[in-house]
Each structure stands twice: as structure tokens, then as C-alpha cells.
Amino acid sequence: MSEKEPILKVRNLSVEFSLPGGGLFGAKKILKAVQNVSFDLHEGETLGIVGESGSGKSTLSRAITRLVQASGGESVWLGQDIQKMNSKQLLALRKDIQMVFQDPLASLNPRMTAGAIIAEPLLTHAPGIGKAERTARVAEMMEKVGLVPSMINRYPHEFSGGQCQRIGIARALITRPKLVVCDEAVSALDVSIRAQVINLLMDLQKELGISMLFISHDIAVVRHIAQRVLVMYLGEVVELGDAEQIVSNPQHDYTKKLIAAVPVPDPKVEMQRREVRRRMRREASAAA
Ligand code: ADP
Ligand code: MG
């Protein structure tokens, strides 16, 4: 395989849900949740998937990895169509592609310690390793995501929201996946915590060379972390390209609306902040 070959190729992927119909005869309605979506993802790249709630982002990501049945199309992982994989191939795939979800606390089992939660994927994907080795790997991973390894026996409710999301990230990375799908992974976090978790994801990505699909309804967040962006509207791709180009020169009306919804920082406030920073720097160098 040449170096330029994408690790993931999605071609004309579609998902339909049949909804119970109303009315006298109760005819079923078909909801086209994802329609003919195509894109490539390269090694080490982050592709942002953005669109308002209900535009099909989660369904798309779940269909790619066959957590939801596609009604048509392909998702080709390292040259193999995931839609046609057998159960053994799918199990190997689950090790390579991991997910991080939105609600940090709700997505962690409250009865398991942080250590057990992070170690769990190893039981499935590396059953051969012993307990001591597993604990060592968990402690190492906790450190990597900015958690103190001495908290290994604490329960999720003893952690803050940001720390819970770090546990979720550690759990996703413990199998050393090649691709991490973050589905609204920072959307439930406070702004300052969100920035920390985004920076952590970017650092880890660089360190580990992983690829990411970063899903968010917030184009400001996506623009920060992704090199390329795919904009979804009503299940379809309306725009796909370089992140900065799409933000500075959106082609589709819907993209323009998403960008317009982002609060623009007040230039006056920004000037004051800069002045404060300058003063602090002056004072710091005077004190040195
Ligand atoms: P997003 O992640 O962008 O918010 P989703 O992929 O969750 O969007 O949903 C896309 C559309 O598919 C929505 O209209 C949603 O109601 C519908 N949908 C999602 N999952 C199901 C399901 N299991 N059954 C029926 N409809 C679904
Ligand atoms: Mg979603």
C-alpha cells in the first residue's frame, strides 16, 4: 500500500430508518438519515464533521464502523470494506477504531473504578496480558491523559467532568487504536475545560500518530482541531474541504449560518486583554 493511500475511504454511504407511520393505514415512513456520504481520511489527519443536531453525524460515524446497518455504500478500512467484514475481522477492527462520547459521567460505568474502566478494552483485545502488565499500562495511560495514577481505584463520581472525559480518552487509547472517533466529546464541558481537553487530544494525536473523526455541532471547536471539515445538512454533505478555507470562505448557505451562530469575540474586550497581558509581561521582566 502506498503511503498516500487513505486509511479510511467512505463511498456513497447511506442509512435509512423506517419510522412507524401515523394515519389510518399506518404506512411506514423512511427517514434518510445519511445520504451518499463520501470522504477520505489519511493517517494522522483529523477530519471534522459538523452540522446541527439531527443532521446525521452520529449515524454516519456509527454506520462507518457498522454499529448501525448501512443501507448502501462502502467504508473501506485499510483496503477492506467494513460493511463486508466477518465477525473475526470486525473484532480486530474494534481494537483499531475507538470512540469517545459526549457525556463523560454517563458514559462511564458508575460501579467500576477508573482503573477497571480504562483496562476493560484490554480484556477483550489483549486477553493474553497479565494483571500486573495491565495495571502498568493503565497507570501509564492515566499519566498520558493528565490523570494522577494514584486515583486508579477511585469511582467516576469522584472525578470532575473534565477528568471523566480524560478517563474516557484513556479507555479509548488503551488498545492503541489507529483511529479515534470523538462524537461531541467536548460539547458537555465548560469552556475552559473544553480547551484543555481539545489540547490534550491534539497532543496525544501528535504523539501517537492517530487519525481522528471529530464530530461537533460547533464549527468553532471543529475548526480548531481539524485540518479538513465535512459539513452535513439533513444527512447530506454540503461542503468538504480545508478547515480554514471553509470558515473564511463558506460556499453553502447552511455553512454560513453555522458560522454566523458562533459568537464573535468583542474587539474591545480583546484589546483590553492584550493590554493586560502586555502589562503583566512588563511587570514580570521588571521583577526578574
Ligand atoms: P446528529 O448526530 O447529527 O445529531 P443523528 O445521526 O443522531 O444526528 O440523527 C440523524 C437523524 O436520524 C435524526 O433525524 C434522528 O432522529 C434519526 N435517527 C437516529 N437514530 C435513529 C434510530 N435508531 N431510529 C430512527 N431514527 C433515528
Ligand atoms: Mg449526534
Image (spheres, grey):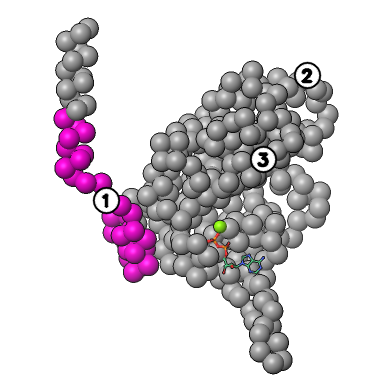
Q: Are marks 1 and 2 in contact (CB under 8 Å)?
A: no
**Residue in the picture at 19% in, 32% down:** 274
Residue for badge 1: 264
Does residue 261 belong to the magenta stretch?
Answer: yes
Q: Amino acid at mark 3?
A: Leu
Q: Which residues are magenta?
A: 247-275
Instruction: Say whether disc 3 or disc 2 marks the residue closer to the N-terminus.
Output: 3
Residue 239 position (above or below residue 101): below
57 part of magenta stretch: no
| Amino acid at pointer 2 | Ala
Nearest to N terminus: mark 3 or mark 1: 3
Q: CA distance from mark 3 to mark 1?
A: 35 Å
Q: Nearer the viewer, residue 257 or 15?
A: 257
Circle 3 SS class: loop
Res. 267 in view:
yes
- Foreground: disc 3 or disc 2: 3
- Looking at the picture, how far across and down is residue 76, in whole percent? 64, 56
Q: Is residue 48 left or right of residue 104?
A: left
The residue carrying mark 3 is 108
Q: Position of residue 195 (x, y in %)?
A: 42, 37
**Residue at mark 2:** 132
Quick one: label 3, few (<14), some, or many (20+) residues within 10 Å? Answer: many
